[in-house]
Image (cartoon, rainbow, N blue to C red):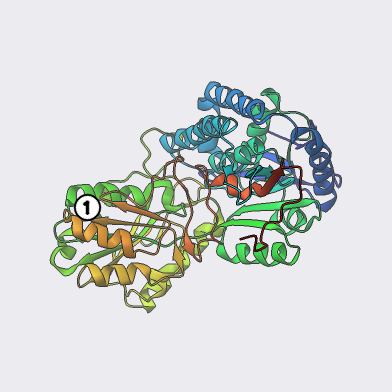
């Protein structure tokens, strides 16, 4: 499968003619190519988006929303086709792949509805015969840079609120899943989105991605990826006074109290740790538990994880698919030495799995992990779970908070007081009670605290904050000059 960039409603190659290969992580085989774009290709995409913005911003918001309803219907029609390919290009098990596409469908419907709910705020004026309100205005060209782990859902999370708010888009997908991005562009084109309103350039971060961040006509940047790259994006965007929204890493914990329902803990933790092969920013990577149930919980986690079946994501019998590429596999393997050096005890796994030519790693569980060790502090982004002991709920919360990230956390307890203690004191943007660390819904804000981002939120109504500016409007119909902020009393 060979695809091109999508610029101004046309499929075009990179100006230098170079191509980027996309690999199937379960086999290591090449499944297609896309352009290896450079700054000159980004220039063309931004120029198209800038020109289209003049008219798109004037399309009534309800009409923009109705186009997103069409996008939703087309995605529904192609859901199985795109899901099957998602299992190939990204490696997710098919049930998760369908969920990825369904999130995009849900977001299209949700943001389509926002076309009739781009609400402003009306405030009473302090003067007679004067009206005052605030309204949302679009910003201009939005640069969207997305990761490979949710190759359909995350572009939808960014693109659809940007569009319904009246912005135009230049979109760069991850190098590992560019063909899925092209399939999404096919849907946008079929839905009748006007030429130039949505543009896609494929390529790597240092060239295509950096060109988007630094382009003077790109007014807002939305980036999801690693904390290291996020800091670079923030620094460059800040220097250019761009609006920048960052969604970065996580090192998420489940806190398990003595009174927890252990059957529920097992279901939630196995799913949170090994679903998507641990390749979620919300994945469960730490279990913080009390001494009274630590041994039983550890034994039962190992027994359950042993039952997980590794294989190709398209096989409905598969529980855990491959890691995305060789670099990701090498990173996870490197933590075997880290664990040994820092005194962790290996309970399960701890080595790659030889399945075909794919990038597979065994579900891995470590015990005796120190709360300040590298194993407990660093985002591994693979199927690795660490068990940490805590004295009580206060100590567990302190250890859960003792990392640079603040995305997601869960507590398992039957005690409502402990639950509300955790809700109040956990330093995370997502907080679950008796549930896994994964499973956010689009109707509430998504994002984190501390090193997880720069304070923005995706999904729900808060996504519009990234892609709009507030304009305050005053209409004086008194016929005289009335002076606010002057002592008239």
In what quadrant of the picture does the C terminus appear? Answer: bottom right
> Which residue is labeled 1 in the image?
303
Lateral position of residue 43 relative to residue 88, left or right:
right
Q: Residue furthest front?
A: 489
The residue closer to the viewer here, 426 or 293, is: 426
- Residue 307 in view: yes
Q: Quadrant of residue 78?
A: top right
477 relative position to 265: left or right:
right
Which percent across, then down, holds residue 300?
19, 54
Vertical placement of residue 310 versus 484, above or below? above
Front position in the image: 471 or 12: 471
Residue at figure coordinates x 57%, y 46% from the top left? 124
The image position of residue 363, as x and y in percent, is: 35, 54
From what the image shows, is residue 212 above or below residue 163?
below
x 75%, y 53%: residue: 212
Q: Quadrant of residue 165?
A: top right
- What percent of the width, then of the height, locates residue 275? 39, 47
Question: How many numbered discs sit on the rendered protein?
Answer: 1
Quarter of the image with the N terminus in it = top right
Q: Secondary structure at mark 1?
A: helix
- Residue appearing at x 51%, y 62% in the figure: 330
- Please give left or right for residue 442 compared with residue 307 in the image: right
Observer-nearest residue: 244 or 208? 244
Q: Position of residue 152 (x, y in %)?
A: 56, 38
Is residue 12 among the parts visible in the rendering?
A: no
Q: Residues within 10 Å of mark 1 (few under 14, many from 20)?
A: few
Which residue is at a point 67% across and 57% down the rendered structure image?
Answer: 484
Q: Quadrant of residue 77?
A: top right
């Amino acid at each position: 499968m060979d695809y091109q960039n999508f610029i101004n409603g046309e499929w075009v190659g990179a100006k230098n003619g170079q191509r980027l290969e996309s690999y199937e992580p379960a086999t290591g085989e090449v499944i297609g190519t896309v352009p290896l774009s450079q700054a000159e290709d980004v220039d063309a995409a931004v120029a198209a988006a800038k020109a289209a913005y003049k008219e798109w911003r004037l399309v009534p918001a309800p009409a923009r929303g109705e186009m997103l309803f069409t996008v939703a219907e087309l995605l529904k029609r192609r859901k199985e086709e795109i899901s099957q390919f998602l299992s190939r290009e990204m490696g997710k098990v098919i049930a998760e792949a369908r969920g990825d596409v369904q999130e995009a469908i849900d977001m299209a419907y949700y943001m389509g509805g926002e076309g009739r709910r781009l609400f402003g705020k009306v405030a009473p004026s302090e003067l007679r015969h004067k009206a005052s309100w605030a309204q949302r205005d679009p910003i201009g060209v939005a640069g969207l840079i997305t990761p490979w782990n949710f190759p359909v859902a995350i572009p939808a999370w960014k693109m659809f609120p940007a569009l319904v708010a009246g912005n135009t888009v230049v979109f760069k997908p991850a190098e590992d899943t560019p063909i899925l991005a092209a399939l999404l562009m096919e849907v946008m084109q079929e839905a009748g989105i006007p030429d130039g309103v949505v543009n896609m350039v494929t390529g790597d971060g240092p060239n295509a991605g950096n060109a988007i961040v630094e382009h003077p006509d790109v007014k807002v940047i939305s980036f999801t990826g690693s904390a290291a790259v996020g800091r670079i994006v923030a620094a460059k965007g800040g220097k250019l006074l761009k609006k920048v929204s960052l969604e970065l890493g996580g090192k998420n914990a489940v806190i398990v109290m003595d009174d927890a329902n252990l059957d529920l803990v097992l279901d939630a933790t196995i799913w949170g740790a090994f679903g998507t092969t641990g390749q979620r920013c919300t994945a469960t990577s730490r279990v913080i538990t009390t001494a009274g149930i630590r041994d039983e919980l550890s034994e039962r986690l190992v027994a359950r994880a042993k039952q997980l079946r590794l294989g190709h994501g398209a096989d409905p019998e598969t529980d855990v698919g491959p890691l995305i590429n060789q670099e990701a596999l090498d990173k996870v393997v490197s933590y075997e030495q880290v664990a040994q050096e820092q005194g962790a005890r290996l309970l399960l796994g701890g080595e790659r799995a030889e399945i075909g030519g794919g990038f597979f790693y065994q579900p891995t569980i470590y015990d005796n992990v120190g709360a300040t060790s590298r194993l407990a502090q660093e985002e591994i982004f693979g199927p690795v779970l660490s068990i940490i002991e805590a004295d009580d709920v206060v100590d567990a919360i302190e250890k859960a908070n003792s990392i640079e990230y603040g995305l997601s956390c869960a507590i398992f307890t039957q005690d409502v007081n402990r639950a509300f203690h955790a809700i109040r004191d956990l330093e995370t943007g997502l907080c679950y009670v008796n549930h896994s660390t994964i499973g956010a819904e689009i109707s509430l804000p998504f994002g984190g605290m501390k090193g997880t981002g720069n304070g923005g939120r995706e999904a729900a109504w808060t996504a519009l904050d990234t892609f709009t500016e507030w304009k305050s409007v005053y209409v004086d119909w008194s016929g005289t000059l009335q002076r606010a902020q002057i002592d008239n009393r």
